[in-house]
Each structure stands twice: as structure tokens, then as C-alpha cells.
Amino acid sequence: MNLDFLDRYAALDSPIHRLDGRVKLLVVLACLSLWVTTPPGNWIPLGFALVLLAAAATASRVPLAFVLLRSLPAAGFVALVAVLTPFAPGGSVLVRVSPAIAISREGAVLYASVVSKAFLSVTSVVLLSATTSFAGILQSMERLRVPRSLVQIVGFAYRYLFVIVEEALRMKRARDARLFGGRWLWHSRVIGQMIGTLFLRSYERAERVYQAMLARGFDPAARPSQPRPLTRADVAALIAVPALVVASRVVPLWAGLQ
């Protein structure tokens, strides 16, 4: 399976695309740490984060529909998982559903904060992956002295995922060619056998892929090439973006807006 479609926007030319991958990775990690640790109910920092991400998406020329289509499902999953948070006992009652069940104001604020933080976090990661190729992210991790074994695990897991998908598609085509219509409970045994076969075939193919990589000179101990020096734009982004995010939390507290 071709992986180029995942990097369809990584080759665009924009100020964000031209930033060093290490800078983008550090900026995203710093912003995520600040957003996640924002106390529930502090909406000004989260609103500023939304404006910052919208500006970044506009500057990177990545279509907004592309970002939303990949951010909303993950945020929706978090919203579904945390759906019982507003019903936590304690606090002032906002809406009473029944004599024994009520939505508390504190629970509703916590729920909205969790969903907002999840959406912001996923959106920032989507923008990072849309403006940096996957190979560039791995190289940036290595140059930031992330343990090499962890970088290799991430890289192999990402690539072998598509090996599994391709094997599953081949088995599906073979199944459809045999007019298999297994959609009911009594077909679960056949489907279970197909899943087991898929695991074995994927494992064997992954081994063949790894042997082919070694035959072509792959060296797990090889270090990446020396990175280029950081430009003024890289240093400015590394300092300015986290500083603005910190200011969005500190300034409202000083002004008494929180």
C-alpha cells in the first residue's frame, strides 16, 4: 500500500512547512502540556489556543476540512467516553433529570473542558503530521535524543500497520471471490479463523519485509545525518509560540478575568 497519501500536504511550501521538524515537535509538546494542565473552566487560554491553531492551519495552507475530518472523530470518542462526567454527584445542580439524577454545574464544566482539550490536542497533532512528513518526525525524534529503540518501534508499527491492512484486503478479496456472505452469529467461527490466519500471514510477511530491508543495507544502529542549524525563524517560533500560550494563561489571572 502506498503511503504517499498520508504526506499529501507535507510537501507544500509555507512558513510552517519550512520550520525545522525539531522546533515543531517541541512547540507541539509544550503547547499540549500547557493546554492539558489548564484548570477546568479557564476558557480564555483554550479560546486563544483555538485561534492559534486556526491561524497555524491558515498559514500552512492545509485545508480546514482535512483538519476537522481527522480531529472531530477523536474528540467525539472522548466526548462519548466521558459522557457520564456531568452526572457526577456533588456540586450545584444545573439540570435535574430525575429525583435521583442531576447534572451538576461543576460536572458540566469539567466535561466541556475535557472535550475541548481533546479537540485542541488532536488538532495540533494533525497539523504537525500535515506539515511534517512521517520520516521527518522520526528524524526529529532521533535528533532530540529520544531513545532509538522507541523511535524504531514507532516507525515499524506505523509501516507494518499497512502490511496488516493490505493482507486483510487480500483475504477479503479471496473471501468475496468464494461468495462468502458471513454476517451472522453462526459464521463467527469462520471469521475467527480468518483473523488468526491474518495474524500469521502478517507476521510472516513482516519478517520477509525486515529481511529485505537488511539485504538492502538497513542498519538499526545508524545515526541520522547532521541536522541543519536552526534559522532565526525556527528560534523565533520556538520562543514565541510557547510564550504566547503561557501569556494566555497568566495575563487573565493578573487581570482578574478568571
Image (cartoon, rainbow, N blue to C red):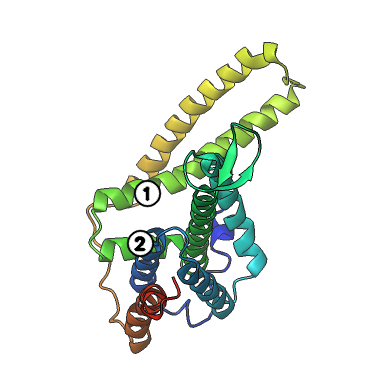
Looking at the image, residue 159 sits to the left or right of residue 234; the answer is right
Asked if residue 230 can be seen in this view, the reply is yes
Nearest to viewer (mark 2 / mark 1): 2
Residue at left offset 61%, top offset 55%: 72
Question: Where's residue 160, x and y in %?
Answer: 45, 42
Looking at the image, residue 70 sits to the left or right of residue 236; the answer is right
The residue closer to the viewer here, 100 or 230, is: 100
The residue closer to the viewer here, 42 or 184, is: 42
What's the residue type where badge 1 is placed? Val
Quarter residue 243 falls in? bottom left
Question: Where's residue 14, x and y in %?
Answer: 52, 81
Say which element carries label 2: helix
* Quadrant assignment for the C terminus: bottom left
Question: Where's residue 221, x and y in %?
Answer: 22, 53
Above or below 142: residue 213: above
Above or below 200: residue 74: below
What's the residue type where badge 2 is placed? Ser
Residue at left offset 23%, top offset 53%: 147
Find disc 2 in the rendering and name its residue. 33
Say which element carries label 1: helix
Above or below 251: residue 36: above
Residue at left offset 26%, top offset 66%: 143
Mark 2 or mark 1, earlier in chain: 2
- Dot 1 crowding, Cα within 10 Å, few <14, some 14–19, many 20+: few
Asked if residue 1 can be seen in this view, the reply is no
Furthest toward the top, the residue is: 186
Distance Cα–Cα, label 2 vs label 1: 21 Å
- Dot 2 crowding, Cα within 10 Å, few <14, some 14–19, many 20+: few
Above or below 60: residue 78: above
Find disc 1 in the rendering and name its residue. 154
Q: Which mark is residue 20?
A: none
